[in-house]
Image (cartoon, grey):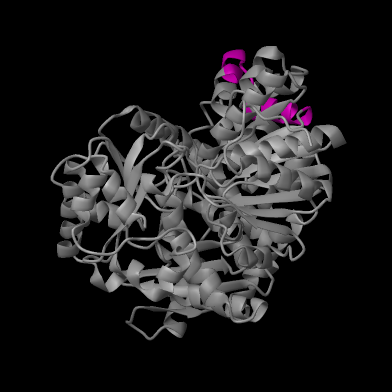
Amino acid sequence: MEVLFRFDKPRLHQDKMMEDIYNAISQRKSIFINAPTGIGKTDASISACLSYALKEELDVFFLTPKTSQHKVAIEVLSGIRKKFNVNVNYIDVVGKRNLCVNPRVNMIEGEPFYKACEDAVKGKRCSFYTKAKESGEPGQSLAEAGMSGHNALFAESFDHGLCAYEIAAKLAKRSNFIVADYAHILNPYTRQTFMKKIAHSLESSIIIWDEAHNIIETASSYLSSSLSLQAVEYASRELMSIGSSIDLGYMAFMLEELAKGKIKDGHEGEAFVDKKDLPPALSDNLEEICDQIEKAGMEYISRSGAKRSSLMHIARFIRALNAENDSTIRIISRRGKAVKLSVSCLYPSESIDSIKSAYANVFMSGTLLPLGMHKELLGFPEAHAINYKSPFPKENRICLLDSDVSTKYENRSAEQYNSIASKISKIKERVHGNLAVFFPSFDVLESVYRYMPYEVGFIQRREMRSFAVEKMIRDFKQGEDSMLFAVMGGSLSEGIDYANNVIKGIIIVGIPLEKPNLELNAKIEYLNKRFGMKGNEYAYTIPGIVKAVQASGRAIRSESDRAFIVFMDKRYSWSMYKSIIANFMHIEEGPNYISKISLFMSGSEKMRSEVNK
């Protein structure tokens, strides 16, 4: 086996990982890899897959759940290309909106953007698209920009007056390695169009799935939607502003009647909705209704200059509402005066089935345990599965527990948030260096932040754009004594390489468990039937712990990195959670953990060895 590896020699276990991946795909078998954060999964997987693909004239896709995770893959490919001068063409592809250079369109958000783009192209009102289609093959400067990342391609395309997405598609056609998002393959509404546009097939492609523990949840999100009474009211105002004759009163009436009929009058709650409970007109005239609403939504955006439209969201929701499969549920809920109808996918069978057509898959993560669960969920019973041990010295990390607080829903209060903020502040006072704090939700993050006695330099916000996330990461890394507040399961807690020991300590506040509700209960029941009474484990406990473990792994990225981790929630000592997290690490319990942090940070070898016995 000869592999293209950009460094002089691999890390411990990295050579074995490359060999295992190469052997699996050479047998046309998929492989599941659990390897600790920092072991070098990206380098190992890309080196093995690219080496085999070049030999067998196959393509490789490197897919991530978040755009911010593309950068590391691009760096690996660049290093290989420079070291070996090998004939590998690669491209960083992101969603069309993130590559739109047309200032009249690119500020529009969500579904309206795609419709606005389509209308501008069909109406020949986008000079960037027209010029890109007529420009022939992209030149060297554009090709080099594409291999430097999507932001570089955006800038270079704009300078040439070209549509960056069309240029990316042209470059992808002649590329044998494509870095992209999960959506490009998992989203059933866009997969075929994308693959046709770039002239590639899954059957002749090896797919590397980074952070593969996210696949099920991400795929399900593409098949889920919701509509609130408030959104209908906003859409009605949009219609009034353009003088449209469309009346959405029937939508508001439907939501109110469903709530009245399914939930006890005047009470809060939620209830399942059957397909037969919906107005027949919504399915009988589906496309006609959606087309009319979409046209009105685009007219509203055009006239008002708004970035988004509730009308476009309603059209998308109506289509989702009429989905027909055994894993789709509909739930009506009332919270105060707010009424909402949700359509949720419990298990994304269609998306999962599409993965199986690939030449081979490499599923990898630092939290892919238990491996058998992921093999079963993704339907690869015959795949290889390997768990690699951490190559890093145990004494370079301590994991400690604060059992005096909890973010369990019934324990949340101003007093609890104030206590957490005080503890974070005391820890930061003992630490010289960057500290990252990860929360179970934005609600908890924002609540704790209110009680912080000083400003926090870097705070993740809801719905941050990819460029804003990248800037925050870059600025945080450059700091020497900064604090980061972010959420678990978000773009700052997974798949990001905080190299060079930039983080000295991590605080995990709470467990990011999904709030129990009808949807979660339905998912557990569905998985119980499909996988033999494993629903609670597969849908609730393991996903929550995995997000916490992912966030905790941001600090140790090499053999020389040293960091402490504090799990701030008494539930980490409960057997049901402790048994799961034991697959990944040992958490030291006991009082005076802040003193232990001070000793660890001072370099006490005795302290480190005692904590990690």
Q: Magenta segment: does it hold 297?
A: no
Viewer can see residue 63 = yes
| Image coords of residue 454 (percent x, y) | 15, 41
Residue 316 lies in quadrant: bottom right
Tell me the quadrant of the picture where the N terminus can be found.
top right
Residue 543 appears left or right of 403: right
Viewer can see residue 285 = no
Residue 372 lies in quadrant: bottom right
Q: Residue at x 69, y 70 (%)?
A: 324
Q: Residue at x 76, y 47 (%)?
A: 192
Front residue of this view, candidates 519 and 119: 519
| Image coords of residue 237 (percent x, y) | 41, 53
Residue 416, relative to residue 49: is it above or below? Answer: below
Residue 40 appears left or right of 136: left
| Image coords of residue 506 (percent x, y) | 33, 47
Tell me the quadrant of the picture where the C terminus can be found.
bottom left
In this view, which residue lies farthest toward the right?
Answer: 56
Residue 145, relative to residue 248: is it above or below? Answer: above
Residue 86, relative to residue 613: is it above or below? Answer: above
Count of numbered tags: 0
Residue 575, relative to residue 588: is it above or below? Answer: below
Q: Residue at x 78, y 27 (%)?
A: 174
Q: Name the dominant secondary structure of the magenta segment.
A: helix
| Image coords of residue 49 (percent x, y) | 73, 39
Front residue of this view, candidates 541 and 414: 541
Magenta span covers which residues? 156-174
Front residue of this view, candidates 478 and 4: 4
